[in-house]
Image (tube, grey):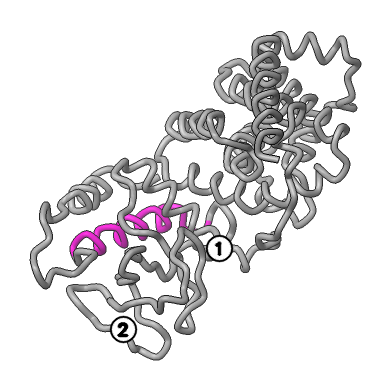
Amino acid sequence: MVNGDMLSRVLLVACAFTPAARAGDPVIPNDAARAIFAEAAALCAADDGKLWGVTLCGPIMLVDPTTHAFAANVNDTQGTLAAAGGVFVGTLPRDQSVANAALEWGGVRWTQLQWPLPDDSAVRGTLLMHESFHRAQPKLALPAAREADNAHLDTLDGRYLLQLEWRALAKALDAPAERVARAAAEDALRFRNERRQLYPGARESEAALELDEGLAQYTGVMLGNGTPEARTAAALRDLQRPVEDPDFVRSFASANGPAYGLLLDRFAAGWQRRIAAGDDLGALLLAALKIRGTADSSSQLGKRAARYGGDELLKSEIARDARRREAVKKGG
């Protein structure tokens, strides 16, 4: 989505970090900060508001988590930051948290990013656009982050069915034939429905985080990766990344968001203009695929699970659950 020559020049500058800091050098080198700001500007300018109907360009603050020193692409509303080498610098108060997140400070809503950023250009671009989405989120008809209890995703059945959903989503994303993609997507939706039948309230709590972190990661994947092939590869990585996490209570949303978003792009073009607070990504895909009902009998669900290594996965999750229970017993 970004001119190749322009982005190449930006990334060459971004990699030109000073190998060893000298006394008096800024914690965040000015040239490196300028390169990051240029990269973000190029990515959001290439989108030009097409994805969500609003621009994601805006104030960015790169913050060193140890010293709280920062470099910004604009001044605050009072003009209190110091201009230095084409950026604005300052130090956040110690009572301000440092994280990859939207931040209200100095009269400005910032995209705050922890320094240093990832070296990998695709990962970095995804992060830049993910957090830029969060900064722009109040302009969208979508809910801001709220606390949602997804503890069921740390249970045996919850983990098992979620991982089956991920495996089916991966097959759907990677399938060139529409028939195969539709069948795998239906499998994912049936695993999803089974989990939500087992845990009352799961639909609402899962959907809330998917509309927040899930759509932010989808945005990062879409705008931070320049080709359809690169976006699919990034979404597949996101489905695989949480598998080794201690639990899936929060990480599931960043895996589901890009997968469902890309499938909706394929089967329900323009869905971004129709989505609203309270919607569910799975329900939108269900409607797009014109699937009637997602309830399966135990035998039907077992046959679907077998297509995705369900037996071995279940054995692994039973063993994990036994270890967890034993650890709780010893700790109690």
Does 45 lie within the magenta span? yes
* Magenta highlight range: 31-49
Q: Splitting the image into 4 quarters, where does residue 35 fall?
A: bottom left
The extreme left residue here reads 22
Figure quadrant of residue 75: bottom left
The reply to whether discs 1 and 2 touch (Cβ–Cβ < 8 Å) is no
Type of the residue with mark 1: Val
Q: Vertical placement of 281 versus 190: above or below?
A: below
Instruction: Give the crowd class for mark 1: few <14, some 14-19, many >=20 residues within 10 Å.
Output: some
Q: Which mark is residue 54?
A: 1
Viewer-nearest of discs 1 and 2 = 2
CA distance separating discs 1 and 2: 27 Å
Spot occupied by residue 296 in the image (x, y as percentages of width and height): 88, 19
Q: Main secondary structure of the magenta part?
A: helix
Give x and y (percent) for residue 135: 53, 65
The earlier-in-sequence mark between 1 and 2 is: 1
Q: Which mark is residue 81?
A: 2
**Label 1 secondary element:** loop
Task: Say which quadrant the C terminus sits in.
Answer: top right
206 to 240, vertically: above or below: below
Q: Nearer the viewer, residue 328 or 318?
A: 328
Magenta span contains residue 6 = no
- Identify the residue at image location x=15%, y=52%: 16
Residue 208 shown left or right of residue 170 in the figure: right
